[in-house]
Image (cartoon, grey):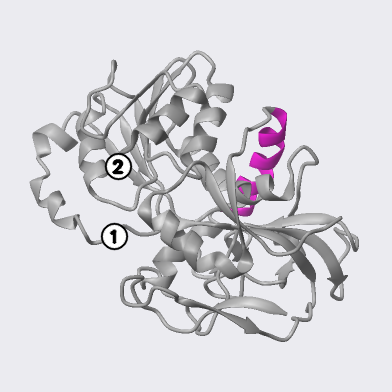
């Protein structure tokens, strides 16, 4: 099978083409596993974190990718949830303990980092961590829902926000454009503000219903009750803490932060950024429950999912475009065309 393989960890500046097109043996599903013929796989910022060593793979070489949509090609022994030909999705959580806090468990293993992922024609997964995709979404539209959407849903839950309150989003890419719509649906009396670095992103946010959109350094019309940060940088963290109202909560939805502007955190001021019972909470991974609950809600709304597609062979270009901030919605690799 064709696969884009990561053989070594290095920065994109040092190694502009970290993924190499390789022929690999088609995997065989084990006990309780399904074999999925992949249609599409989303491109997530976490892939950059893996490639550049911020959350390095536990094995090399490895096939990245964890926003996978495809069809069941084969069933391993003991499988009963799905049938051959059924469309399913696979997300960041490959396996864990199954407990409510399985995202924090030492047993947590990630798709595309700890095991081979979706930048390939086939992948195996435990049937308990595969998900039925709502019919309303195309394959490409469904891919970002498996991570950007699922972890965005988790982030929104962790804000503890209630209807009528003000939510702000820092960064407006694959996850942000889904969370905005989700928040508008779940909390219709509330307001959603968006902080984004480019006018293109801000215009897209307004198009999707943002009540206000401005640059990271600007002050919104009201102090938010909660802010979700989805950026790879530190500057938005400092800015968000300053913008929060007393008792507000900042939820950081990122696997890792980059080092480029980390020194800015030396400017943190207790009275400006932390005092008045402000809270800071990180999002660690995603659980089975998050994805399973989120997908039906996404279909009920239904979410408008904006995607830009690339062929599998152009995965490196997709990563460079993502890193450069050339994002409107989410980026998706098209692996196979199903009729």
Task: Measure how far apart labels 1 and 2 are at the Cα level.
Answer: 18 Å
Q: Residues within 10 Å of mark 1 (few under 14, many from 20)?
A: few
Residues rendered magenta in the picture: 287-300
Q: Quadrant of residue 112?
A: bottom right
For image coordinates 66% across by 45% down, the residue present is 141
Q: Is residue 82 visible?
A: yes
- Residue 325 shown left or right of residue 57 in the figure: left
The answer to which of marks 1 and 2 sits earlier in the sequence is 1
Chief secondary structure of the magenta portion: helix
- The residue under the point 41% across, 35% down is 201
Q: Secondary structure at mark 2?
A: strand
Q: Residue at x 56, y 30 (%)?
A: 182
The secondary element bearing badge 1 is classed as loop
Q: From the viewer's perspective, tell me whether residue 38 is left or right of residue 286.
A: right
Q: Give the vertical position of 216 relative to 58 (above or below).
A: above
In which quarter of the view is residue 236 placed? top left
Q: Nearer the viewer, residue 56 or 65?
A: 65
Magenta run includes residue 333: no
Give the percent coordinates (x, y) of residue 39.
74, 60
Q: Quadrant of residue 130?
A: bottom right
- Residue 54 locus on image (x, y percent): 35, 68
Q: Is residue 110 found left or right of 76 in the rendered image?
A: left
> Where does residue 243 sit, x and y in percent of width and height?
23, 29
Q: In the image, which disc is placed on residue 280?
A: 2
Image quadrant holding the N terminus, namely bottom right
Look at 42% across and 18% down and name the residue there.
Answer: 211
* Quarter of the image with the C terminus in it: bottom right
**Image-based side of 208 in relation to 41, left or right:** left
Q: Position of residue 165 (x, y in %)?
A: 41, 18
* Number of marks in the rendered image: 2
Question: Dot 1 corresponds to which residue?
Answer: 258
Question: Would you call the spot at circle 2 few (<14 residues within 10 Å), some (14-19), or many (20 or more)?
Answer: some
């Amino acid at each position: 099978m064709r696969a884009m393989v990561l053989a070594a960890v290095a920065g994109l500046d040092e190694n502009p083409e970290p993924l190499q097109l390789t022929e690999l043996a088609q995997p065989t599903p084990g006990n309780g596993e399904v074999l999925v013929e992949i249609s599409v796989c989303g491109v997530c910022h976490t892939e950059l974190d893996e490639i550049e060593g911020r959350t390095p793979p536990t094995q090399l070489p490895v096939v990245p990718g964890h926003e996978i949509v495809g069809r069941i090609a084969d069933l391993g022994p003991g499988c009963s949830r799905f049938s051959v030909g059924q469309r399913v999705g696979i997300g960041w959580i490959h396996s864990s303990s199954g407990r409510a806090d399985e995202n924090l468990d030492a047993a947590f293993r990630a798709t595309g980092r700890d095991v081979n992922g979706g930048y390939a024609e086939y992948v195996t997964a435990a049937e308990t961590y595969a998900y039925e995709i709502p019919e309303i979404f195309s394959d490409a539209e469904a891919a970002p829902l498996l991570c950007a959407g699922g972890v965005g849903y988790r982030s929104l839950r962790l804000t503890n926000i209630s209807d009528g309150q003000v939510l702000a989003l820092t960064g407006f890419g694959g996850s942000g454009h889904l969370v905005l719509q989700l928040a508008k649906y779940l909390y219709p009396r509330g307001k959603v503000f968006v902080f984004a670095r480019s006018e293109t992103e801000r215009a897209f946010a307004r198009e999707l219903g943002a009540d206000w959109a401005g640059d990271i350094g600007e002050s919104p019309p009201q102090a938010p009750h909660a802010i979700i940060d989805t950026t790879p940088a530190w500057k938005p963290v400092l800015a968000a803490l300053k913008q929060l109202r007393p008792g507000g909560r900042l939820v950081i939805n990122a696997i890792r932060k980059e080092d480029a502007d980390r020194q800015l955190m030396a400017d943190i001021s207790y009275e400006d950024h932390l005092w008045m019972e402000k809270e800071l909470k990180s999002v660690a991974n995603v659980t089975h429950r998050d994805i399973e609950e989120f997908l039906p809600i996404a279909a009920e709304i239904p979410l408008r999912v904006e995607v830009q597609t690339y062929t599998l062979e152009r995965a490196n270009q997709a990563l460079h475009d993502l890193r450069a901030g050339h994002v409107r919605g989410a980026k998706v690799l098209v692996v196979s065309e199903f009729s």
